[in-house]
Amino acid sequence: MTSIDRSYHITTFGCQMNKADSERMGGILEDMGFQWSDDPFTADLVLYNTCTIRDLAEQKVYSYLGKQTRRKKDNPDLVLIMAGCVAQQEGEALLRRIPELDLIMGPQHANRLEDLLQQVFSGAQVVATEPIHIIEDITKPRRDSSVTAWVNVIYGCNERCTYCVVPNVRGVEQSRTPEAIRAEIKELARQGYKEVTLLGQNIDAYGRDLPGSTVEGRHSHTLTDLLYYIHDIEGIERIRFATSHPRYFTERLIKACTELPKVCEHFHVPFQSGDNDILKAMSRGYTHEKYRRIVDTIRKYMPDASISADAIVGFPGETEEQFERTLELIADVGFDMVNTAAYSPRPNTPAAVWTNQLSEEIKLDRLQRINHLVSQTAIERSGRYLDRVESVLVEERNAKNTDQVLGRTGGNRLTFFNGDIEELRGKVVPVKITEARAFSLTGDMVTKIE
């Protein structure tokens, strides 16, 4: 079986890491001769890059695959692939549930897609979920944007939060070398990209698995050092990073962000709960008070910085009073955005088998209440942008209003304004904000691009 004149479709669930993995796998498929198809029900190869953080996302994958298996009965040449965290979590057991799958592959094997497919094309049914050392990524991703790009800097996670399946499905931490990261970003700059986001499941852990230490006793390679190392790459105008862990977040990193003008004033630091007993049960390794000190330090150095976070409600044993401490933290800090979720028991995690699970009714009620507060807080935070002139990196045309373009402020607020996308794509332009919503802005460009 060859890939000539064959099409592929990738559906991605979950986090930015999954999106970056999908871009790399898309690049591999196109190097093999496959062509992208917008329609998963006409494509010759269909890949689902899965997420197991929430049960809803996992069940959605099975629903989609059910429709594809019916297709395969009429078209035996259809290639079905499950990649990502559900694939890693379930492994060979998936073949009993979905025997039509041709390839099951965990996140650590994304760079091996071509080799694995060659085995499939030779008639094998392949399961690739064994732990491996991730080789340096020399693939060319199929980027979903021509302006902004994800750059993986560390794979895996060594944390053991009691609710989280990520360490089981993404493996141990493996940092890429600074030289490899810089080379990838230089190539992105050569291709015309203007913004990069450094990615890691726990990006503050970057470098602690690399050799060497400083005279001060620090690791020779840290996220802070990496930011200094890549900052001078010509052509890159903005640098972001995610996701940070409060246990390792340092004042030295915040100071670096103030000294490096390309680094955006936006920090994504999940707190998960505002209650110390729940944080201890989650094995998060910090307290409410330490998290507040992080926020206070960010605002000491960068008063206007945007701060976003993640929160879980309905964790096993969470009382109403403990939930209210989470609400108090949100109201007290004034986050620009909080990604919220009701606790969902995940396979092979300690909390999943605890006997103090909360009812779905309680979890849904708390999720609705926290979401209401998050929206209120976000609207209040957006209000500070009104009548200000913000620098916006233009990314694309607004699909809902083609007279408008869209981009983001340094603080990561999505912003819309009238303009010609062919003229403005990839430009950083001044925009006066005329309307502020909870999670987006509208404005007018105040100067003409020369």
Image (cartoon, rainbow, N blue to C red):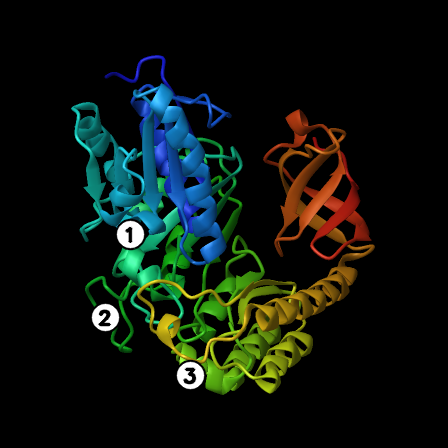
Res. 28 visible in picture: yes
State the residue in front, 209 or 357: 357
Disc 1, SS: helix
How crowded pointer 3 is (Cα within 10 Å; few <14, some 14-19, many 20+) is rated as some
Residue bearing mark 2: 213
* Circle 2: residue type: Ser
Q: Residue at x 37, y 58 (%)?
A: 226
Spatial CA distance of label 3 from label 1 is 28 Å
Q: Give, as a three-letter code, the residue at label 3.
A: Lys
Left or right of residue 258: residue 331: right
- Where does the image place residue 127, in percent across and percent down from the top left? 21, 42
The CA span between labels 1 and 2 is: 39 Å
Q: Which residue is mark 1?
A: 90
Q: Position of residue 370 (x, y in %)?
A: 65, 69
Q: Is residue 246 left or right of residue 412?
A: left
Q: Residue 280, labelled with which disc?
A: 3
- Residue 411's x, y, as percent? 62, 56
Give the foreground label among 1 and 2: 1
Residue at image x 56%, y 56%? 264
Q: Are marks 1 and 2 in contact (CB under 8 Å)?
A: no
Q: Relative to the observer, which residue lies in front, 373 or 101?
A: 101
Q: Residue 304 appears in which quarter of the rendering? A: bottom right
* Three-letter code, disc 1: Glu
The vertical placement of 364 against 107, above or below, is below
Q: Earlier in the sequence, mark 3 or mark 1?
A: 1
Q: Is residue 114 above or below residue 408?
A: above
Please identify the quadrant where the C terminus is shown. top right
At horizontal 58% and vertical 70% (from top left) the residue drawn is 363
Percent of width and height locating residue 224: 40, 64
